[in-house]
Amino acid sequence: MRLRSVIGQSGRGGGVNVTPMIDVVMCLIVFYLMVGQLALDRKSSIVVSESVTGVERQDESDAIEIGVLMDGGLTLNGETIEVDRIGGEVAGMMVRQGVSTVRVRADEASGFGAVRPVLGQLREAGVTGVEFVTLRAGQGGGG
């Protein structure tokens, strides 16, 4: 590739075309935004326990979901929440959305000690339809 000089613009050096660099930076921004959004999806990081009993559900869109993470943290439909606020928030969501079921997806490593305060808050808020998400024994893997 050779440089061309334009008549009447002597003294100016050849410029650097930054358009490809801007394109690459924009692609990186989009990539990191997508990866960051995937990392915020805490539902996939919970490994649920196995069970030999229970009813298999196909439609999970009609329930409010509470996630109990391995470190004891809580999520309500994917958003982080404190245990003392969960009862009131769930009761309000049930009224606003007309939903009657709450699903608790607890990490296998969290133990029942992390689930007990959640159930207490739900009971105080008057929530009666609570289901636990598990895997059928023998399937293994995370949920």
Image (cartoon, grey):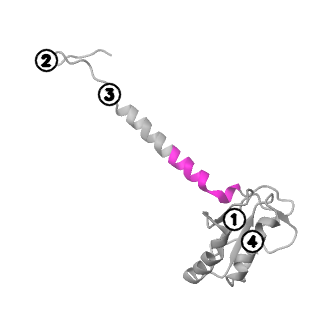
Question: Which tag, 3 or 4, sits closer to the chain's start?
Answer: 3
Q: Nearer the viewer, residue 14 or 139?
A: 14
Q: Position of residue 101 (x, y in %)?
A: 68, 79
Residue range in magenta is 32-45
* 89 sits left or right of 30 in the view: right
Say which element carries label 3: loop
Question: Which tag, 1 or 2, sits closer to the chain's start?
Answer: 2
Where's the C terminus, which quadrant?
bottom right
Instruction: Name the amino acid type tagged 1.
Output: Gly
Residue at point 17%, 19% (across, down): 6
User: For mark 1, what is the residue?
Assistant: 67
User: For mark 4, what is the residue?
Assistant: 117
Q: Position of residue 106 (x, y in %)?
A: 75, 64
Residue at point 72%, 59% (across, down): 69
The main secondary structure of the magenta stretch is helix
Which quarter of the figure has residue 135? bottom right
Q: Nearer the viewer, mark 1 or mark 2?
A: 1
Q: Position of residue 21 (x, y in %)?
A: 40, 32
* Contact check, label 2 and label 4, Cβ < 8 Å: no
Residue at point 75%, 71% (across, down): 117
Which quarter of the figure has residue 137? bottom right
Question: Which tag, 2 or 4, sits closer to the chain's start?
Answer: 2
Q: Label 3, label 1: how many angstroms apart (C-alpha)? A: 50 Å
